[in-house]
Image: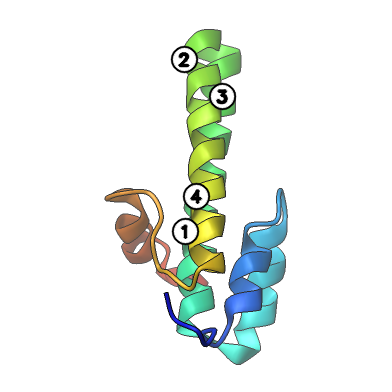
Amino acid sequence: MSTSSPLGKSTALIAYAPFVGFIIAFFINKDENHAFATWHIKNMFGLFLLFIVSLVVQSQIDVTVGDALWVLCCIVWMYSWAMAFYNQRKGIPFLSEKFQDWFTFLS
């Protein structure tokens, strides 16, 4: 663990605020353009989409599967926030790296 915080750490932490955090962080980072914050903004946007999928599954397909997806999303969200707090670029295995490739419009 690094003793100095990367540029954009506070913006990265804001990205994980529920509901609109990644939108607020996106606009804060728009001028600053810190790579650390951008990575976590993209990660949270992907998590937000996964939350939406879990709610759709819960309401339209199967409540039990939707609940399990929702709980999994919450656990991964807390883990991702902790990784931002500890100055790491880690999130969901495999998916977080895909989020970085897919959501280039958030750069």
Mark drawn on residue 10: none
The total number of labels drawn is 4
Q: What residue do we see at 54% from left, 47% from top?
A: 77
Mark drawn on residue 56: 3
Q: CA distance from mark 2 to mark 4?
A: 21 Å
Which of marks 4 and 3 precedes in the sequence? 3
Mark drawn on residue 79: 4
Q: CA distance from mark 3 to mark 4?
A: 23 Å
The image position of residue 92, as x and y in percent, is 38, 49
**Mark 4 nearby-residue class (10 Å; few <14, some 14–19, many ≥20):** some
Residue 62 seen from this side: no
Pointers 3 and 4 in contact (C-beta within 8 Å): no
Q: What residue do we see at 64% from left, 90% from top?
A: 31
**Mark 3 nearby-residue class (10 Å; few <14, some 14–19, many ≥20):** some
Question: Which of label 2 and label 4 is nearer to you?
Answer: 4
Question: Which of label 2 and label 3 is nearer to you?
Answer: 2
| 104 or 4, nearer to the observer | 4
Residue behind mark 1: 43
90 with respect to 23 (left or right) = left
What's under tag 4, amino acid-wise? Answer: Tyr
* Label 2 SS: helix
Pointers 2 and 1 in contact (C-beta within 8 Å): no
Residue 65 seen from this side: yes
The image position of residue 23, as x and y in percent, is 67, 64
Question: Which of label 1 and label 3 is nearer to you?
Answer: 1
